[in-house]
Image (cartoon, rainbow, N blue to C red):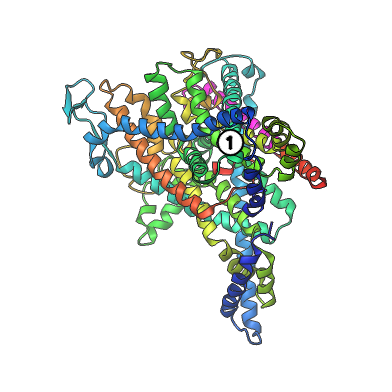
Amino acid sequence: MSSEARLQPAETGGQSGRRAEKGTGGRLVRLVTGSAAWLPLLALLFVVVSLVVEALPAIRVNGIHFLTGVAWSFGNAYGAVVKTHGVPHPQGASYGALPLIVGTLASSAIALLIAVPVSVLSALVLVERLPRSISSLVGLFLETLAGIPSVVFGLWGALTLGPVLAHHVYPALASVASAVPGLGYFGGYTGNGEGLATSGVVLAVMILPIVAATARDLFRQVPDLPKEGARALGMTEWEVATRVTLTWVRSGLIGASVLGLARALGETMAVAMVSGVELGAIPHNVYAAMSTVAATIVSQLDSAFTDSTGFAVKTLAEAGLLLAALTLLTNVVARVLVRRVASTALPVGRGV
Amino acid sequence: MSENGEQPGAREGVERMALAADRVPGRAPMSTRRSFRRRVAGSVGWTVAALALVVIGVPTVWLVYGVVARAVPYWTWSVLTQPGAGASGGLENEILGTLLLVVGVVVLAGGVGVLSGIYLAEYASGRWGNLLRGGSEVLAGIPSIVLGYVGYIVLVVDFGWGFSLAAGLIVLSAMTVPYVAKSTELALRQVPTSFREGADALGMREGYSLLRISLRAALPGITTGLLVAIAIAMGETAPLLYTAGFTGSLPSLALTHKPVPFLTYAVWTFYNQPSNYAVHLSYDAALILVALVVALIVAARLVVVWTQRHADRRGGV
């Protein structure tokens, strides 16, 4: 039901089929459904415009420092209110989101590094070697992962996975890494399990469903003929899988990874629960506490209300704008690369 | 599925095979040592790939087991029947609030989404149609916390609704309408043209044939879209924190000025509270959420069976 090609005939039929007739009833149907169809686009414009309007004063005050600075301070809540470019804000307010940007990109990168090879390899073995029954079991697992709310991932990451990693995995990893030159970022103090590495691992599990399910659906679309030809040329099954099947859908696989990236960049709750929420410093090693743009908005909005000038809330709008731009860009790239719809029953990873 | 796209793909495939064949060591009579090495490479490759499968399975089982094992020993059924805010009581208010939000989303996002999907499938073509579709997809790609933030600034503060059912529902609907619209559109497009032509030939009015013929045939697809909307309404936290708010008492049906508690809030807020009771409640909420997810997955599978039956019947036409 997913294949685009199959939709083509119905599509043309569906569009020409109804055009001819025009009556009062038809016009009413068209009016009602048409106004509903405009709502998502209008909502989108509304969101973007109100974000920009809300963020504009903050953009003017924070300037380029917002992207390059390392600081997150509301300023002196009881001190004098000063004005910069006509925008009132507490004295000493200083916002630099560089640590958040680094945290967002680094945790998403870790997630991709884990999730993409795992997804592609497992989809490959699933499609090429294993019977349908196992495939359906793994499909069930992927749907479960896709459906579980992100706060539950956060709960698991914070109270189950994080401590296990911190006690059993990170110390070993750090001692190995400190012995190898060039891996200094993986050595040092391993912390309590809340930080960049744990966020990356939890994000990896969260984006597994979208990447794996998309890869699986792509592999299933590879026609048999070239595979049989490759076998006839004497290739082993592994060679057929890696040289024919894999290369056949290469751009689709990149698209699937970018879809996963878009989800990882925008993920909020789970990261807010396992990142350690460190806003004012770039993580000094891979285990250090950090925060992401999305997690910062959710964790800081409460305290931002206490800023009587409203400047902290406006700065969060700027962060939201940055995040929206980042995810929009990745989403557009992914859609161009994938151009297809996932066929799983539940929206694996929310990719429409 | 694979029979599609073979026409353009076949030639490309031959070229690829030729390229790949160049890379196969020893096209001439294969030396046994080389072929041994290639077979070993294959076994190693498949073993690693099978291990990757384990990497998917372990976290899934661990996650579900982790929640069940920590929630069940302390489970008391009174959790379902007492309202509370973490330190005492249960989760009745959160459960009812989540139910309220789910029903609201099904009505609001379901209505708007289905109507919008009908328009996209039946009337929207060319540039305008693509604009509407693109806007809807972009909206679905915006991180939920950003939508929640805008909902807070505009609905809660500027409109003066306060933390309320209406604010939460509108933000959730903005997130879910694209999914319902998309699945409705796809389902309607798969309704065979002969159905519509038959209806036209019988002289059915446009609205009537849409309702009785097309929508009926597209019902399984639309239901899948609604299940997605339910899953999002149930599982989202970030867009609700600053729009629906929270209260320790039962939710009311008032649209504005009355906060609505919800299950994910309990997980997010109670898990790091000092009292053990709150932590247990957090796990209880997570358990209920996982159970609801499982129920949704079962429902989605049933819809797939239903779809296949539909398809079979269609095949006979």
Name the spot of residue A142 as percent of width and height, x first.
62, 45
Name the foreground residue: A34 vs A149.
A34
Question: Subunit of mark 1?
Answer: B
Name the spot of residue A305 as percent of width and height, x first.
33, 22
Tag 1 secondary structure: helix
Q: Which residue is mark 1?
A: B119
Q: Residue at x 40, y 18 (%)?
A: B159
Q: Is residue B234 visible?
A: no
Identify which amino acid the numbered label 1 is placed on.
Tyr
Q: Residue at x 49, y 21 (%)?
A: B275
Q: Residue at x 64, y 85 (%)?
A: B31
Q: Residue at x 53, y 29 (%)?
A: B173
Q: Compared with residue A67, is residue A241 higher up or lower down, i.e. above or below?
A: below
Name the foreground residue: B291 vs A56.
A56
Q: Is residue A302 left or right of residue B285?
A: left
Instruction: Spot the residue most to the bottom.
Output: B29
Magenta-colored stretch includes residue B244: no
Name the spot of residue B11 as percent of width and height, x first.
61, 71
Name the spot of residue B298 as percent of width and height, x first.
71, 36
Q: Residues within 10 Å of mark 1 (few under 14, many from 20)?
A: many
Magenta-colored stretch includes residue B286: yes
Q: Is residue B115 visible?
A: yes
Give the main secondary structure, helix, strand or loop, of the magenta stretch.
Answer: helix
Report which quarter residue B113 is drawn in: top right
Which quadrant, please, contains the C terminus of chain A?
top right
- Please provide the residue range marked out in magenta: B271-300
Instruction: Spot the residue most to the right.
Output: B316
Report which quarter residue A312 is drawn in: top left
